[in-house]
Image: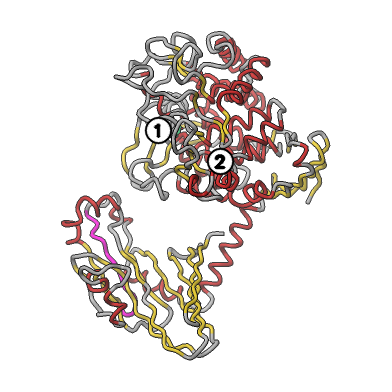
Amino acid sequence: MGYTGFQAERRGLEANVTYLVGREENVLIWEMSLRSDRDRKVQIFPYVELGMMEFLREIQWQCYNKHQLACYPMGEVLVYRYGVENQPRPDETPLVFFAADVPVAAFDCDRDSFVGSYWSEENPVGVEQGELSDSVMYGGDPCFALQLDLELAAGEERKVHIFLGTAMTEEEILQTAARCRKADFAQRAREGLQEQWERYLSGFQCTLADKDAQTMVNIWNPYQVERNFQFSRNISYYATGTFRGVGMRDTAQDILAMIPLDTGRAREKMDLLFSQQYRDGHCNHYFFPTEGWEPVTRIHSDNHLWLIMDVYHLVMEEGSLEYLSRELPYYDGGWGSVWEHVGKSIEFTLSHMGENGFPLMLCSDWNDMLYKVCRKGKGESIWTGMQFGTVLRMMKELAGLMGESGVKYEEAYQQMQEKVNSLGWDGAWFRRCITDEGVFIGSDREPQAKIWLNTQSWAVISGLGDPDKQIAAMDSVRKYMDTELGIRKIYPAMEDYPSKEDPLTYYNKGCGENGSVFCHANTWAIIAECMLGRSDYAWKYYRQLLPMVAQARAGQERYRAEPYVYASNIFGPESDRFGLANVSWLTGTAAWMYLAVTQYLLGIRPCWEGLSVKPCLPREMLPAVVTRRFRGKVYRITIRSNDDVDVEPA
Ligand code: IFM
């Protein structure tokens, strides 16, 4: 885990390169090993195209900003200095360096000198000529290129290390490069990484009959969880780091899956999120701790409620109320304990109810697209009502543990229950929201977008739906929304709804928010089916979205995403590209899929009294064995059937 390797062989010369970042230094290590079948001279040209720290600057203003760039040698180390005057945090803009642990025969710092005017990186002129020109660059387009001349004896294996790193000063660069060049540095970095991942992944391991599921549970799903947790939606192959920052709702959900694996890291992120909450209980929507930019202050009806889920899960994982008394700042001044913070979340929703008794949508709920139903400030979210119900139950339980009365939470829950089962019920499923004009969206009476997945699954998750309605709603999901590649988010997709002039969405039919298989929302359907005890449906919904299964079923050319990471969505049947997976890596699917399989299908859930084990697996998945770290101990759990489990210290 945590490294990438490439291998090549040509005319008797074998080359392997592994790239990794260890824990000790801010350095990308390139570990290269070479072996030749005969004595020969080999030249290596490690090369890096350097940018301007922010890609937008390079696109918009390269012609001017290039005046502020410098790239030059310091002994055998190359250094890149990016002019910092316009950087958001000038004091934190580092120098970049490039070094090797073998003698450097020559170098280039100027990209034109290395690549050549009108040449390309496919055939750089420096490589063709077999000699770099020792170019320096003060104003222009920078690069790092080294020329390493080696002599290999037949059969000999030679290791070469190259280091691409950052440091604040030239002095620090020299010190870092010296530490990197020590004989065992790369090996220690590799071992450190291995230990780190092993510690993380050993929190939950399973043996399952379904080996695809086992691979996802043991390795790739928690790996994706970690990447999401680390980067929020800030960087990926898709998101660019320019506007998404740390999203309140996204990050609060990412935290849910980090809690069982590393409560320390989860706590740190929770502290950060709570510092974006205002004294009235609402939260900033996105913020930018790395860039230091102003946050996006739009108020959405769901953001502040996700925080309660984090707190509840953390308390149950730790079996301690200690985090509730932690004092944290409010964004608009003052401090409060975490218990006070979450109390404010509840108060905010209670004081922002619409005229039908559901929470005001404000600037949309979980479903981004709904911002259009509430532009006049009157639109209401039935789904947020269900999310509210879910966290009210958590608050009631926490209040009991705190020795306080939970009556106000119970009363609010009952009021919401009454609304959900009357106004919220459409006859065969639950409605989704109410527009400013009082139209119920997600109703059979409407011509399009008649049924929405989230209000069916959350009617079960919140427990708000009457028992017969919960079953009817999830049956409607199966009847109208399920496909062989997952459950659609809405059905039917919208074309000109509510009107051609002002449509609710510009997404094409079957794409993204408009009727794709939205993988994140599928996770809640799995959980809901588990809560209803319907293991066959739950497992079907889980298995059909395993990335390797979806890819195999759709066909590689149709699916076009990695077979080991969850994608945000897959184009639905109403698109002519049904089966095309989009936005893999950074999606709330990772965290919730992890919860769905570990806490609901395998059913291993922390609660105040200890570890509750209530699996919901179909017969063909039995038996299953899990090891789970919990409150400092490791347990081995054998699931022989959903009613026959053994828990013993591992
Ligand atoms: O909930 C959102 C998320 O914040 C960003 N991606 C889409 C989701 C559904 O609209």
Query: Does 266 sit above or below residue 532?
Result: below
Q: Quadrant of residue 320?
A: top right
In the image, residue 372 lies at what x, y percent?
Answer: 36, 22
**Residue 311 seen in the figure:** no
Q: Is residue 84 magenta?
A: yes
Residue 116 vertical position relative to residue 534 in the rendered view, above or below: below
Left or right of 483 on screen, residue 175: left
Q: Which residue is mark 2?
A: 591
The residue depicted at 45 percent of the width and 42 percent of the height is 582
Judging by the rendered image, the residue that carries numbered circle 1 is 285
Please give the count of numbered marks on the rendered protein: 2
Residue 149 magenta: no
Disc with the residue nearer the chain's start (2 vs 1): 1
Left or right? Give the position of 597 relative to 641. left
The location of residue 575, given as percent across then percent down, is 44, 33
Q: Is residue 15 left or right of residue 76?
A: right
The stretch in magenta equals 75-85
Residue type marked 1: His
Question: Disc 2 to disc 1, how far (Cα)?
Answer: 19 Å
Q: Position of residue 114 (x, y in %)?
A: 26, 73
Determine whether the residue tagged by mark 1 lies in a helix, strand or loop. Answer: loop
| Label 2 crowd bin: few (<14), some (14–19), many (20+), radius 10 Å | many
Judge whether residue 608 can be spotted in this image: yes
Residues marked 2 and 1 touching at CB (< 8 Å): no
Callout 2, which amino acid? Ala
Secondary structure state at the residue bearing disc 2: helix
Q: How is the image coloured?
A: secondary structure
